[in-house]
Image (tube, grey):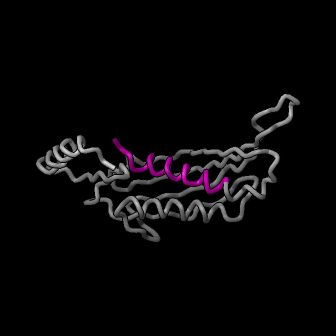
Amino acid sequence: MLHARYIPILSALAGFALLCGCTVTFNMSGASIDYNTTKTCEIKYIANNAEIVNPTLSATCTEALRSRIQGDTRLGMVARNGDVVFEGTITGYAITPMAVTAENVAAKDRLTITLRVIFTNTKDPKFSYNKTFSRFAEYDRSKVFASVESQLIEEIVPLLVDDIFNASFMNW
């Protein structure tokens, strides 16, 4: 919720942008997109090339990114030739021991998911990138991984999508 003290500042900025003829749009997600030139988005299916493969992770990541962009921008989704294009590969899905007890036994394990994303902005190529994003969640080692795996993925994927979205559309 906006505090009342910010409304005059935002109004002044909006008025200034109108006077200058700016076409960049700022919304509550913080995305800065020139909707006069950038109208479409293509999200290619995110392949899973990790050593350990979760069979639903590719679809989960692809749909989460698609939902975020549809929910927080006015970009139309297209199957090909988008003004902005996302290509991704899951390159890591690893479980590592973390916290150690007094008996030198791991008390927690960490699931880390790593995505390599190629973002192509055909309208403003200086914002294109090829980056790796990685996020993790920890769980109590006394739990069987299979019993917490889907919950961990539900925690990690939105964080990855936030990082990808911010790297792609927060150009200020």
Residue located at (64% from left, 45% from top): 136
User: Given the current orientation, which residue lies at the most extreme bottom position?
Assistant: 79
Q: Is residue 37 left or right of residue 150?
A: left
Which sits in the foreground, 171 or 104?
104
Number of numbered labels in the structure image = 0
Residue 158 falls inside the magenta stretch: yes
What segment is highlighted magenta in the picture? Answer: 152-172
Q: Main secondary structure of the magenta part?
A: helix
Residue located at (57% from left, 65% from top): 45
Q: Position of residue 157 (x, y in %)?
A: 59, 54
Residue located at (28% from left, 55% from top): 34
Residue 109: image quadrant is: top right
Residue 62 falls inside the magenta stretch: no
Residue located at (67% from left, 53% from top): 152
State which quarter of the image contains the C terminus. Answer: top left
Q: Is residue 49 left or right of residue 67?
A: right
Q: Position of residue 57 (x, y in %)?
A: 65, 61
Q: Position of residue 21 (x, y in %)?
A: 15, 51
